Amino acid sequence: MKTYLDCLPCFMGQALRAGRIATKDEKKIKALLDDVGCMIKEIPMDNTPPETGDFIYKKIREITGVFDPYKKIKEESIHDALKMYPGLKQIIKNSDNKLLTAIRIAIAGNIIDFGVNKTFNLKEDMQQILKQDFAIFHFKQFVEHLERAQSILYLGDNAGESVFDKILIEELGKPVTYVVREIPVINDVTFSDAMDSGLDHVANIISSGCSAPGTILPLCNDEFIRQFEKADMIISKGQGNYEGLSSVDRCVFFLLKAKCNIIARHLQVREDDIVLKASNI
């Protein structure tokens, strides 16, 4: 997915939010915005948004001196999600379709996103998504692929969301490799975040090798590429991974909530719709 003009002010907004979280020094924040503004002037519009995000967050780390601005926010998100875990497991136990309910829960976790300028209430949004209609619903294809799969590659997105990913992984009933970001970027899940969420109990955890807020194959390490090429089934969570992989020539199941109008238009859905989309079936 390419960069659109509407993405440009979003890049500036992300830089400002992250800068304010990282430091109270107004001069550093101004320097950050100056550099990001100059950078945006030069970026190719054919780049995916996560590729540009990679440059922006490198600049944030460089100017503020803070390696993981969202560290505390991620810890709080994981803590809040873990408190919900027992109740959500009970919902699945009482469900007529446990797998579909687990998919809804995993998508609901996708609202924990500090890269978009959007507020959320985790408990209220969870209840909404548990009964919300899908705008794209390739569940039949998902089940068919799952039944045949001997290995699943699951691409994580946000840190708190990873707790809800764990719930879905527990319902898949197949060996899963869970993929995290190489280093902290926004509130995306890293290896230590996945461990805090308990993913090591249900999956093998690897890094994609990519520091961008999405999966950009040319920036990924060899181990991930091998897994990506050989996995029987790929599940991709969130907007950043969709932006990076939407044009990849292999079957990927995208699970996400459309949290911005650019993603919604690209998917041909409405903003705030939920999606279970299979590409290249």
Image (tube, rainbow, N blue to C red):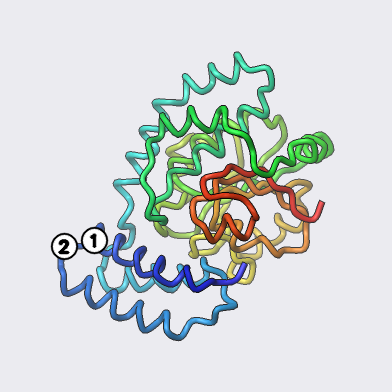
Can residue 149 be seen by looking at this rendering?
Answer: no
Residue type at tag 2: Lys
The span from disc 2 to disc 1 (Cα, nearest Å) is: 6 Å
Q: Position of residue 23 (x, y in %)?
A: 20, 62
229 versus 90 height, above or below: below
Q: Position of residue 39 (x, y in %)?
A: 40, 81
Which secondary structure lies at badge 1? helix
Q: Quadrant of residue 106?
A: top right
- Taking the spot 65% from the left edge, 55% from the top edge, the residue there is 268
Q: Which residue is mark 1?
A: 20
Which secondary structure lies at badge 2? loop
Q: Is residue 122 left or right of residue 203?
A: left
Can residue 56 be seen by looking at this rendering?
Answer: yes
Residue sitting nearer the eye, 55 or 40? 40
Q: Position of residue 71 (x, y in %)?
A: 32, 50
- Taking the spot 37% from the left edge, 55% from the top edge, the residue there is 117
102 versus 184 height, above or below: above
- Taking the spot 50% from the left edge, 30% from the top edge, the residue there is 128
As drawn, which residue projects farthest toward the top? 94
| Mark 2 surroundings: few (<14), some (14-19) or many (≥20) residues within 10 A | few
Q: Position of residue 219 (x, y in %)?
A: 58, 70
Residue sitting nearer the eye, 76 or 265? 265
Residue type at tag 1: Arg
Which quarter shows the N terminus? bottom right
Mark sitting on residue 24 = 2
| Mark 1 surroundings: few (<14), some (14-19) or many (≥20) residues within 10 A | some
Tags 2 and 1 touching, CB below 8 Å: yes
246 versus 75 height, above or below: below
